[in-house]
């Protein structure tokens, strides 16, 4: 795919040209929704049109039309116009499938609760951003370990900050979804020891150790790099706070590519 659209900082669809080279990385919680298929019908794109999504619908065998009483599927392309989304769902009870723009759906949580019905399937972009986000997270970690921000601002040579190698370091990944799985794959050449912290018991392929979130403080003291990639929920708010930061090494790198709410910003500033 060589051209299409991207999302701007406000969660709106911005038009432009870009190349897509990534593949979906499904988490173990992903499921095949085809068995839940309901009445067929046309698909609408709102609150604005998008050439790339229109092509995707057509390639998938769907029929596009403007939102009306015959529409059965809705692709919603805004993460900020929540009230409008709520109104659309209320005025179009015939909808049986709704696709949301991001992997996370916390912005829509109240609306989804209001409109939850057995005959309506809500889907998100979970897994679609795993590869680029994991790639970005690794870049941030390497940048911190090698003091790139400090060196980029330097005006003279300074051998004080030589940097730290990622090879054979202890890595803690908080979250076990698609981003975590892709991170594990990217970290493999560095021969790191990976510990995954997840909500429910169970192993994660490629991880050396998997623990539940109640053991987070047990594994943080040995971490050289901590990646935060968990979903934003009421339970994960300030998952990294003063107690967690206090047990981490002063040299540890903390990389949060999840929602900002997972890290207590005030506690982080105090720790720094």
Image (tube, rainbow, N blue to C red):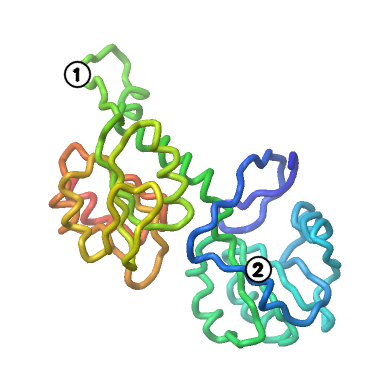
Up/down of 3 relative to 263, above or below = above
- The residue under the point 30% across, 47% down is 208
What's the CA distance linking mark 1 and mark 2?
A: 51 Å
Q: Which mark is residue 99?
A: 2
- The residue under the point 81% across, 78% down is 40
Between residue 151 and residue 206, name the one nearer to us: 206
Residue 222 lies left or right of residue 57; in this view the side is: left
In the rendered image, which residue does mark 1 sit on? 160
Percent x, y of residue 262: 33, 60
Crowding at dot 2, Cα within 10 Å, few <14 / some 14-19 / many 20+, comes out as some
Report how many numbered discs are placed on residues in the image. 2
- The residue under the point 55% across, 86% down is 114
Say whether marks 1 and 2 touch (CB < 8 Å). Answer: no
Of pointers 1 and 2, the one earlier in the residue sequence: 2
Percent x, y of residue 107: 50, 69
Residue 249 lies left or right of residue 156; in this view the side is: left
Crowding at dot 1, Cα within 10 Å, few <14 / some 14-19 / many 20+, comes out as few
Up/down of 165 relative to 169, above or below = above
Q: Which mark is residue 111?
A: none
Callout 1: helix, strand or loop? loop
Up/down of 169 relative to 128, above or below = above
Report if residue 236 is visible in the image.
no
Percent x, y of residue 193: 28, 41
């Amino acid at each position: 795919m060589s051209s299409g659209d991207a999302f701007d900082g406000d969660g709106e669809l911005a038009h432009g040209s870009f190349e897509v080279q990534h593949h979906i990385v499904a988490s173990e919680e992903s499921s095949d929704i085809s068995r839940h298929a309901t009445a067929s019908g046309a698909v609408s794109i709102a609150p604005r049109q998008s050439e790339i999504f229109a092509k995707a619908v057509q390639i998938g065998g769907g029929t596009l039309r403007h939102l009306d009483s015959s529409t059965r599927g809705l692709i919603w392309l805004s993460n900020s116009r929540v009230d409008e989304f709520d109104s659309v769902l209320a005025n179009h009870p015939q909808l049986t499938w709704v696709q949301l723009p991001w992997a996370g759906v916390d912005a829509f949580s109240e609306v989804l609760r209001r409109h939850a019905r057995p005959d309506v399937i809500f889907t998100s972009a979970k897994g679609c951003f795993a590869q680029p986000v994991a790639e970005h997270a690794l870049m941030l970690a390497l940048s911190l370990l090698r003091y790139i921000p400090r060196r980029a601002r330097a005006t003279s040579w300074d051998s004080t900050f030589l940097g730290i190698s990622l090879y054979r370091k202890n890595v803690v990944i908080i979250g076990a979804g698609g981003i975590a799985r892709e991170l594990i794959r990217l970290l493999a050449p560095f021969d790191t020891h990976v510990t995954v912290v997840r909500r429910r018991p169970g192993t994660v392929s490629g991880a050396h150790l998997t623990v539940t979130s109640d053991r987070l403080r047990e594994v943080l003291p040995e971490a050289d790099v901590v990646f935060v990639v968990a979903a934003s929920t009421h339970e994960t708010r300030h998952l990294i706070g003063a107690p967690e930061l206090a047990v981490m090494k002063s040299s540890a790198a903390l990389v949060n590519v999840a929602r900002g709410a997972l890290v207590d910003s005030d506690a982080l500033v105090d720790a720094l």
